[in-house]
Image (cartoon, grey):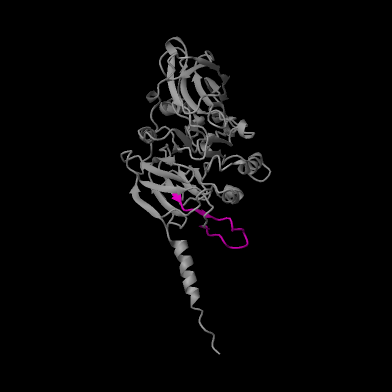
Amino acid sequence: MAAQPITHIPCILLCIFAWVCHAGKTSPYVRSTDASIDMPAHAFPPPRGNNTPEQVHITQGDRGGRGVMISWVTPLQPYPNIVRYWKANDPDKTVHETYSRITSYRYYNYTSGYIHHANIKKLEYETMYMYELGKGDAIRQFSFKTPPKVGPDVPYTFGIMGDLGQTYASNSTLEHYMANPKAETVLFVGDLSYADDWPLHDQTKWDTWGRFVEKSTAYQPWIWTPGNHELDFAPEIGEYMPFKPYVHRYHVPYRQSGSTSPLWYSIKRASAYIIALSSYSAYGKYTPQYNWLEQELPKVNRRETPWLIVLLHSPWYNSNNYHYMEGESMRVMFESWFVKYKVDLVLAGHVHSYERSERVSNIRYNITDGLSTPIKDQSAPVYITLGDGGNIEGIANSFTEPQPSYSAYREASFGHAILELKNRTHAHYTWHRNQDNVAVVSDSKWFFNRYWFPKYESV
């Protein structure tokens, strides 16, 4: 008797083919491929006055948002090393003082200024503060607002940027972000000054970058993530300590989360639990970063901080030929944990364009089973690549074709993103291209929380 045809196989194959080959949107807009040019040093002059504080930047100083770490540089001498601060609405202007810890470093033929880090503690939540640095003709005054108390339905808005550099395009990105009044804190996914792109890792680029971003960093916290351009590892000129300039200049509250390194740590802010990882530090089994993350993820209380967000530099899901699969080994180590603990978003940089993924995972795959295609996974994060700050290396405009199924939206241009946490279940996300008015949204999405409302978002 002749075998009967198995008519359902083509249907199954068609369904598989539709998932594998169905792609999201590749924007037809492509930024000019002309190289981005660094702004000249004279565009970032030091402030006037004698030994005037400069390169002022703030970040969160503790786990829960009542602390602020204020950092600055004095070029000539270490003192004064005092920050004075008071509540902006205090009619008596009761002034408090905190002293900074001072550090400096040498790098080949460069000696840094005196780098100050002052940690202000036990501030009031959701309060505007003024602060003052310097003395005499060198006094400078700034302000910041503390976040609301940590809680599950506390709304809060983050800006997101990466791979900024200090080019004319970088300035466009930063000005565009600052014109967007919503965001209260920047999640920065690595690659700051790009000093290492210059001969002998020109350390003066760290100084000009600090002056460049001060118009934002002095007034709202930036949550730092190290990238490959923070390595500054240059044995050919006798520099064997990775991350030396970065760890001297940009302090974070890593010890409060039990971390042994400032390159990976966590904080809580409003309704978000934020974990920053280092793509360029060891993360294999038994390494300090691996051990820390293994112990850290079970500590996240989604009833207190429902939104779990991870920052790293090298993306795990990338459909650009630039830096393709460079994050693969880290994905293999940690992706199953991200799915298990229902991470909401993974924000990365490194690739100098913009891309947003579907909710997918590839945790089934091992070297023998052949199941190497990412699949839809309701417990998986959305992966967003925002290496589109505008740095000197230019745009990454070589997307793989056809667009893979895991890629929802991608565009070869520079910009910034805004993430509005509305409550424990919903967050609204937008991405803004530099070339448009800030009110124009190039990509947007409502995200549903993986713990409280784990539904697939509509296409």
For residue 177, say whether it is visible. yes
Quarter of image, res 139: top left
Extreme-left residue of the structure: 437
Residue 178 versus residue 190: which sits nearer the camera?
Answer: 178
**On-image quarter of the C terminus:** bottom left
Residue 94's place in the image compared with 459, above or below, is above
Quarter of image, res 138: top left
Q: Is residue 188 magenta?
A: no
**On-image quarter of the N terminus:** bottom right
Residue 52's place in the image compared with 41, above or below, is above
How many marks do you count on the picture? 0
Could you tell me residue 207's position as x and y percent?
47, 25
Extreme-bottom residue of the structure: 1
For residue 240, say whether it is visible. no
Could you tell me residue 318's position as x and y percent?
48, 50
Residue 302 versus residue 132: which sits nearer the camera?
Answer: 302
The residue range painted magenta reads 356-375
Q: Is residue 366 magenta?
A: yes
Could you tell me residue 143's position as x and y percent?
43, 23
Residue under the image location 61 percent in, 43 percent down: 297
Residue 366 versus residue 149: which sits nearer the camera?
Answer: 149
